[in-house]
Image (spheres, rainbow, N blue to C red):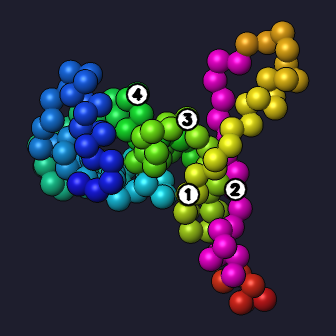
């Protein structure tokens, strides 16, 4: 497994989940996607190719468990779900820049919640999501080369 696999395994154990071959394979596969999102159906296809008897429900339940524990980050893109491996286990609350062309994900170091909280003094914010979209430096350079 790749970066942060010990953190992921520790989280699973701490929450009473067994470290099965299937979960290890899913962690290994997902750990390749720390810097981009992958469609959940691709995760499903990968797992079923390695474990033909594994049900769709088991795969999706494990993805949900991983998301609930902060091992992966999930988001909806239109009518399908995508997932990526947690890029920062020490700071699970963070935000992203996502390249619209190549899908590369860059972690943002600041949370804008304080800015909005000041504008809503009598309100209680219980959740938020903040993502920026555009072209990464490499894609922007490629686009300039074609101009």
For the residues marked 1 and 3, what is the alpha-carbon distance in whole angstroms? 15 Å
Residue on which disc 2 sits = 133
User: Could you tell me how far apart the alpha carbons at marks 3 and 4 are, in whole angstroms?
Assistant: 13 Å
The image quarter in which residue 14 lies? top left
Q: Nearer the viewer, residue 32 or 112?
A: 112
Task: Check disc 1 and report the residue beneath it.
Answer: 105
Q: Residue at x 19, y 45 (%)?
A: 24
Image position, residue 114 (x, y; %): 76, 29
Which badge, 3 or 4, is on the more N-terminal residue?
A: 4
Callout 2: SS: strand
Tell me the SS state at disc 3: loop
Q: Which residues are magenta?
A: 125-141
Q: Which residue is mark 4?
A: 68
Examine the rendered structure and indicate whether residue 17 appears above or below residue 95: above
Disc number placed over residue 13 in the picture, else none: none
Q: Depth-wise, is mark 3 or mark 4 nearer the camera?
A: 3
- Mark 3 lies on residue: 93
């Amino acid at each position: 497994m790749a970066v942060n696999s010990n953190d992921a395994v520790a989280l699973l154990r701490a929450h009473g989940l067994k470290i099965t071959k299937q979960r290890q394979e899913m962690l290994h596969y997902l750990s390749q996607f720390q810097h981009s999102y992958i469609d959940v159906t691709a995760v499903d296809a990968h797992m079923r190719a390695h474990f033909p008897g594994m049900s769709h429900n088991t795969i999706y339940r494990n993805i949900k468990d991983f998301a609930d524990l902060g091992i992966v980050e999930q988001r909806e893109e239109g009518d399908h779900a995508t997932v990526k491996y947690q890029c920062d286990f020490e700071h699970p609350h963070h935000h992203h820049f996502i390249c619209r062309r190549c899908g590369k994900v860059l972690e943002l170091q600041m949370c804008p919640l304080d800015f909005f909280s000041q504008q809503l003094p009598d309100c209680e914010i219980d959740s938020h999501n903040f993502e920026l979209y555009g072209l990464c430096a490499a894609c922007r350079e490629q686009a300039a080369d074609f101009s």
